[in-house]
Image (cartoon, coloured by chain):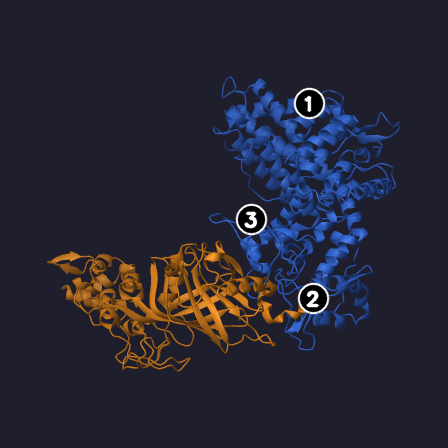
Chain colours: A blue, B orange
Amino acid sequence: MKMSGKGRGMTGKGMMRRLALCGAVAALCLTGFTGQSKADGDAAGQVAMRRLTQDQYKQIINDIFGPTVTLGGRFEPDLRDSGLLAVGAAQVSVTAAGLEQYDLMARSIATQVVDEKHRPLLVGCKPASETAPDDACSKAFLSKVGKLLYRRPLTQHELDAEVAAANAATVKTGSFYNGLGLSLAGMLEAPEFLFRQEAVEPDPDHAGAYRLDAYSKASRLSFFLWNAAPDPELLAAAQNGDLNSSSGLKKQVDRLMASPRLEAGVRAFFGDMLAFDGFSTLAKDTTLYPKFTSQVLRDAQEQTMRTIVDHLLVQKADYRDLFTTNKTFLTPLLASIYKVQASFPEGVQDPWVAFEYPADVPQAGILTEASFVGLHSHPGRSSATIRGKALRTVLLCQKVPDPPGNVNFNLVQDTNNPNYKTARQRLEAHRTQPSCAGCHKIMDPVGLAMENFDTIGGFRTTENGAPIDASGELDGAKFSDVAGLGKAVHDNPAATACIVNRVYEFGAGHAPNKSETEWVRGTLAKDFASGGYKFTDLLKDVATSDVFYRASAPQTGALDTPKAKLASDVTGNQEVQK
Amino acid sequence: MNYSHLPKIKHRGGTFVRTVAICAAGFLAAGYAAHSAQAETRGYAVSWFYMAAESQNDDCPDGTNPLSEVMVRKLLSEKGKTPAEIDFIMKDFPNNLRDTLYMRGKIDGKPVNVYINPTSVPDTNIKTAKGHVAYGFNLDGKDGPNDFVDPQTNEHGVDDMLYRAVGCFGTQRASGGMRPTYPAIQWDTTRDQMPAWIIEISGIERDANGKVKDGDVKVGFYRATTPVTRNAAGDPQADMSFTVDTNPRMQNVVHATIQNGTLVTDPFEFYLVQDPFAVAEYHFKQTRVRLMLNEDGTAKGVLGGYEPWLPVYESFALGGSTNELNLSIDTPGIYYALRKLADAYPDASGQNQYISASYWIEAVPAFVSHSNAEKTAGIAGPVRLAQMHQ
């Protein structure tokens, strides 16, 4: 089936979709995309309209249509805000070029879904005639798929419109499946699919307060724990009201957390927090560092992910030990980068093995992995400053000001200056400039502790023939090497406060406002500590809390918006598909 | 932890301490108790192995062997083609000449594959190298008129008749540290799929300044279970981990002496499987290896020994007409030259079966592990494991 412009033009549906999407985006631009009604000091959390990330989009398509339906096209770049892409997702729109890509992907997916290979399984029903409209089959398919795509049942109005579009396209193209595919393509580029739209409703337990409606709650929960849209069981729990009870919510949280799919959620969170999106543009000078290949780049990210997943989900160990653990996972290439000996299974492509660093090697904790020291370095040399800044901003959630615009970096960048052989010497000279000294004081003592690692993570004891001094200090804790730095991060209260805050932000899609902050810094942080800093406990505490699903009051007139109308339709039991 | 005390082994950060225990165990078991607990083991992956050449301007006094175009014209002429016919055929050179070349042999008047039957054509008496400069070793203890002087060690009586045989083909010539074209192509083509060759040197001691001390060491030449991995520059990745193939025929262990940072083995028998595209199996008798252990962790040196000349011929013949046309190799000519210049181990007829040869070895640092450590621990001297387990 070909979905040409002619097809879209015939029904006018593609144009309508575009207008709807662009209209929604334009409206969001004016309101800051969040839909919140009050200032940050509101007692309840903001509701947001977050664009699906690449991984979420791919996962949803995979979940609904299976792995044999492939994706093409490019995604719009994500935006990092408040340290997370998950927060930035509420700040982004869709550009014209991005819409073209969504359109391409939508039509490609829809074409595959209704092709002869997939239609028996994915469409599920057969039309009375393959050349004529069939309301029953169209309705059955579009309502089933629409519920999964929009993360809520379609309103009657929506379903009628989709069926009508499919019928019109069927008449024009002479093919039921072409018509059905065109309607599906339209849904795949609809703002209801591309954006996670949250709807609010009055909270019956707290007069005058609001909460996310059950479907929005299901979405927030599912994307938080699985980085995916709600599955049918979770949607059912939303539909029958279970999610609005503490026991029903806990039951679903337990189910989601017991699933292997929790790993995807944890990977998504840490990939976001650790800014692994930076790997997509990471480059190294392979003339100087020929060990660095694209495979090393992939392995470096995966090493840290495997370390995290094993440590936090499998071992259920103390989060802080991620900075000191000598347990990790290696590939042959990573072992060569770190210059450690490891045994790998034979005949296995890209083998991974669990590895425990010997006591006499410096590697310990994720700070010493290539995903950190390599990601936060220059292409041809390490950077104590960038690493120090990354440690403070990424892992401790501290703010480090940007450098002033008129800084002279010549001294720092000249690694061949015989008077300043090591980064420490160069930075000491650089810090004599008063405008630089202030910020470098908080970055360099941390970053210089990682100088035993070159720009790709390879271990070294000297730079330009001069011994490297890796001693330093972090918020009063002094150490002599990177292992000491790991211990200092482990013991630093900011590290645990940071992860608690980031987890909440990741799930909620916004930085906590005043009342949320009180709960996050208070109850949530204390429970995390008293439970031994178990990451899964932290996830569960957030996922089962009331705070996580509270919403601020809608803006005056907001309920009259199409978005609110749809929500009203749904919550008003006008849904058509159960 | 302060690692600034480790610059001695800066290229292998952290390996020093770990290797102490491994080495100590092995050597104590072998009666090497004299080696202190400071003994160090270093591993290498062979990045290059190719025929050594230090070609001189005057070692082919009659010029090098002709390029393939000249050789083909001569062949066509011998087949009775007229100059005009030859010009017409050569317009498409080097295409459409495969049959002309490979079926040029004659047995009982019938055309045969010349690469399988190299004596089916007369000896073309290819030009052979006449010089006296070549890397290697004096394998037979004599200094004769056909012998060379090693430009690196000034050793006289160096035996390297392989270079004499093929040294006047342009693709076999090199000097000044360059690799001869064809041998380099052979190794480069095969190393992605052939299990890596690895070297393990144990018993290395260092002085207070970190310099490698003179003394006895044990050297293992092994085949690994996995190939090398290329880095971004296309060279083998350094510091990879390899496991020794448990097949004892893939293990050669020999005593060696280090002097001034250069290791020289005792004579030993060397056997390692390579790849049929080059030489399927390398087998050297009376082998000696000289390796310079560089402070950056790499090693480079020369292997000399007597190898069967027929597999060497086969390595050229395997390429057939492609080799002859593109590399200007006269394959049957090489057969005759190797047979004539072979200089050791005669058969009953008196025909020498082995030819002296020298090869460069280049290696990058690697980690070597033994899946069955006791098999090699403690074995010292010019004894192959294969012999130990017989």
Looking at the rendered structure, whether the residues under marks 1 and 3 are on a common chain is answered as yes
Question: Residue B42: x and y, percent?
Answer: 52, 66
Q: Is residue B346 above or below residue A338?
A: below
- Looking at the rendered structure, the secondary structure element under dot 2 is loop
- Chain under callout 2: B
Between B372 and B227, the residue placed more toward the observer is B372
Quadrant of the rendering where the C terminus of chain A is positioned? top right
Labels 2 and 3 touching (C-beta < 8 A): no
Residue A314 location, x and y as percent?
66, 41
Provide the secondary structure element on which disc 1 rests: helix
Residue at 70 percent of width and 21 percent of height: A575
Q: Which residue is mark 3?
A: A352
Q: CA distance from mark 2 to mark 3?
A: 30 Å
Residue of label 1: A157
Residue for badge 2: B2
Q: Amino acid at mark 2?
A: Asn
Which of the 4 quarters of the picture holds residue B79? bottom left
| Vertical relation: A565 (above or below) B196 | above
Q: Say which chain tag 1 marks.
A: A
The answer to which of marks 1 and 3 sits earlier in the sequence is 1
Residue A543 at what x, y percent from top left?
Answer: 76, 35
Q: What's the residue type where badge 1 is placed?
A: His
